[in-house]
Amino acid sequence: MKISFLGSGNVTHVLARMVHRTAHSIQQIICRRPGEVQQLASALAIPSVISFDEPVAIADIYIIALSDSALGSLHNIFSVNQGIVVHTAGAVGVDVLEKIGPETGVLYPFQSLRKELQQVPKIPFLVHSAHKETLHTLYSFAQDLSPLVEMCTDEERKKYHLSAVMSANFINHLLTLSFDYCKSEHINPGLLEPILKETIDRVKNIHPSLLQTGPAIRNDSATITMHEGLLASHPEMLGVYQLLTKSIHNYYRLRNIE
Amino acid sequence: MKISFLGSGNVTHVLARMVHRTAHSIQQIICRRPGEVQQLASALAIPSVISFDEPVAIADIYIIALSDSALGSLHNIFSVNQGIVVHTAGAVGVDVLEKIGPETGVLYPFQSLRKELQQVPKIPFLVHSAHKETLHTLYSFAQDLSPLVEMCTDEERKKYHLSAVMSANFINHLLTLSFDYCKSEHINPGLLEPILKETIDRVKNIHPSLLQTGPAIRNDSATITMHEGLLASHPEMLGVYQLLTKSIHNYYRLRNIE
């Protein structure tokens, strides 16, 4: 199939590299700032990069990789009469595309994508369309990109997106606070690497609630008080420490696992 | 050297397996419930497993792998006149051992250890002793167990322990809440695996504050409000969601990165 991309950001960069490896061809990239994808277009031999006021070529799938906020007004500057139009957003319904094309769907890469990545990570794709045939085409296309493909509704996709915010997104913030703390206390954050890897690896087989350790689940008030003392000069971390300690405490108290 | 262990828990199980692979020999395991280590003792051909009221053999290093709370009163049931006595605790000073033996130190495995693990994960060891020669012996012994060994003071070790609670421990709790949410909403938590792995992998080279994504850093109040709606029936998660959203917002607002 002929694939075109809208947008010049991380999603276009990573997905274009993935499409390039398949038998599908990339037809065109349409974006506000064509300069941002020139390097990508050269590397992948993409024949056409245009801005929104230039003529759009016919494609089988138009992959819209724009910010959530840009999706709502896209129909003012872009629409097609044929082909499948999909967006790639977790928290936006498919109906935002209704004025853009006759066949619409969603192709949501359930991963945190950055164009700088040397290697493309494993990416589950969540696909959706209200039209059975379109859904079938999208599912099959996604399978050419990744072995991990699931169909899900708009509502389910929003829940997936929320679960990724609650885990990956907030985990990244805990890492930020922890690494900053190490730096300000002159200890080596690199030593955390093995325990972080282990923490993620082992939940593949065991529910994390069976793996919880630390002072909060033990009700170890001496250690908690000591930690609060160490965090006296880090008020932002102290607030997070106290809330998550309380949340762990509540979780296991309610379940009588203690 | 001859190594003896005190305790029958996770730390004894994992460290004994590590010692077994070296040229050092395990002399004895001393614990309250010898039955709990019989399988380990058989597997590693450890010649003696005794309870605390039996005669203790002479060893070069006694590794105390008991709970923090048991360390304070250990001197009532155990002491030696020779050999190095170390504990393995992150949040307890070395002075808790002063009535137990003439040479004392700390050998802290900076990892979450579970005896069920098939493979021993990478373990950084943080070693400490007030005596230069003892510290040298412990450092060299730890290097026989792992390529990752650092010396640090009691104060530094407490900070390392806190950094692991803030990251690994709290991360595990976020995973618990996220997996529970997926289960209660009938979506597949297994699809989170790639994004979780990616989140941990990429902070090896880039500070996580440069990798933060999601609605909180974007000030995307439409998505945040939508997520709060989805969490209306999950009050424990909602509290955590709101605090961490606010913490991310504060962190980047204060740094003017937005």
Image: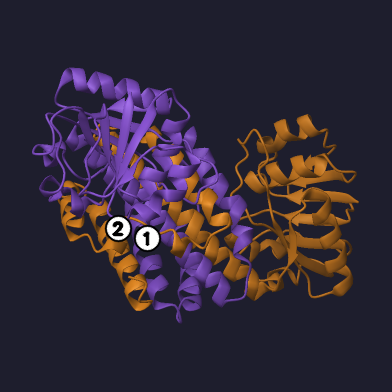
Chain colours: A purple, B orange
- Residue A106: give x, y in percent of width and height: 23, 34
Q: Chain of mark 1?
A: A
Residue at x-position 62% and y-position 36%: B117
Q: Of the residues tagged 2 and 1, which is closer to the observer? A: 2
Q: Cα distance, mark 2 to mark 1?
A: 7 Å
Q: Is residue B151 visible?
A: yes
Extreme-left residue of the structure: A99
Instruction: Say which element carries label 1.
Output: helix
- Residue A244: give x, y in percent of width and height: 37, 60
According to the picture, the residue beneath numbered tag 1 turns out to be: A244
Tell me the number on the disc at residue B240.
Answer: 2
Residue at x-position 87% and y-position 66%: B136
Instruction: Say which element carries label 2.
Output: helix
Q: Is residue A122 above or below residue B217?
A: above
Tell me the number on the disc at residue B16.
Answer: none
- Residue B187: give x, y in percent of width and height: 28, 32
Question: Circles 2 and 1: CB distance less than 8 Å?
Answer: yes
